[in-house]
Image (cartoon, rainbow, N blue to C red):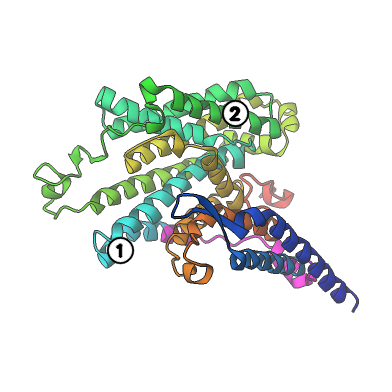
Amino acid sequence: MSAQPSLLSRAFREASVAALVVAVLGFPILAYRAAPDFNNVLTLRARWPLYFTFCALGFALRFVLTLWNGRPRTLKAEVAAAKPAVKRPWLAWLGVAALIAYPLAVTALLGPRPALKWVDTFGVQILLYVLLGWGLNITVGLAGLLDLGYAAFYAVGAYAYALLAPLTGLSFWSLLPVCGMLAALWGVCIGFPILRLRGDYLAIVTLAFAEIVRMVLINWDVVTHGEQGLFNFPHITFFGLPFIPGPRGFDAHFGLHFAAVHKLIFLYFVVLALALLANVVSIRLRRLPLGRAWEALREDEIACRALGLDTANIKLTAFALGAFFAGIAGCLFALRQGVVSPSSFTFNESATILAIVVLGGRGSQWGVALAAVLIVGASELLRQLNFLKMVFGPDFDPAQYRMLLVGLAMVAMMNFRPRGIVSAREPTIKLLPVAEAAE
């Protein structure tokens, strides 16, 4: 009888502290907004309703979390939590079918022009982050190597295509593996100096590597055009047929009316096919000795060495393969955007991809895909929530709070599911009981 009041008082005390922390940290950001007046002089505008709303949200969230974590768990709930997840292979096929039908259904329902945003932003963009997440999942999730500079390999792939396509005249299909291999080469280059590092030291070195790449892209004006970036490179074609109006275009060849969405639908299916290929390669590799060596390295590097495994080669292969998929994604990014510049490959990009892997569950393919949909899709949905301006005022821009919501999602995950959305990981190899092994 005494446990419940103590839990309530503890929840109230922790919630008050959380609200106080939000009030102190959020005061310079939420309470006032600097905006120019008619004389172009910056003035401070008070936003007290927004400020107190966030404080109340911090109090309520911490109060609920404390009650949730302190609730008594029944024996039935503990048995259900320990029970292994039931495999449903038909779910994967259902998901693939839904992904294939998505751009066609959206175009049929909304029409070619309104469907542009839904195919591009909620289709191609999310799939690119899924591909990036699965690539980084090899380095971070399987091999346990903390990489904070993954955007550097992404940039190598994008700039490789933007530079080589007009220089060599090769098609997208010819340059796609080249972009991946160049990024993999950079992965090996960064892997050699850090073979003896791990943990925080490894994260710092990879972060420095990403900044070096970004500074080179900014200052090497002769080749990269600095902050302006590169944009005069060939766009994607349907095996030689360009997506342009006129008799030489894709639409005229197949007797269709010209629509810009056709190019995006084709790019969507290319990204989807490559993302599924990355998923299959990752799953297959986990069942091979190399995949098991990655997992052994992640669990205990010293034990891995004691077993005679070559940890240097294991790290290099993890870095190279993860960088390869980042290079592929970079090439696709250049085709989607039509321009590449250093501002697209900042630390925020690396942090977002790492957040996808951690939030989804390190080593889980399903979890990474779900986290990419939640983080990227929810961020884009925020731009559509204009009705919130009626609540918080006309100056309120929901898209500015994207990273704040990502941070709240990470805090909630640490409390509810510390190992990610999909925390259960099937071992790639199992030791059977003696009786079953004898049969």
Name the residue tied to disc 2: 208
Q: Nearer the viewer, residue 395 or 60?
A: 395
In terms of secondary structure, where does tag 1 sit?
helix
Q: Nearer the viewer, residue 417 or 387?
A: 387
Residue at the spot 73% in from the left edge and 36% down from the top edge:
300
**Residue 235 percent location from the top left of the image:** 26, 38
**Residue 140 percent location from the top left of the image:** 60, 39
Quadrant (top left/top right/bottom left/bottom right) for the N terminus: bottom right
Residue at the spot 44% in from the left edge and 55% down from the top edge:
38
Range covered by the magenta-colored residues = 68-95
Residue at the spot 24% in from the left edge and 26% down from the top edge:
169
**Residue 369 percent location from the top left of the image:** 50, 52
Residue 14 lies left or right of residue 25; in this view the side is right
Residue 202: name its quadrant: top right
Mark 2 or mark 1: which is in front? 2
Decide: marks 2, 1 in contact (CB < 8 A)? no
Residue 312 lies left or right of residue 17; in this view the side is left
Name the residue tied to disc 1: 105
Q: Earlier in the sequence, mark 2 or mark 1?
A: 1
In terms of secondary structure, where does tag 2 sit?
helix
- Residue 120 in the image: above or below residue 416: above
**Can you see residue 284?**
no
- Residue 87 in the image: above or below residue 358: below
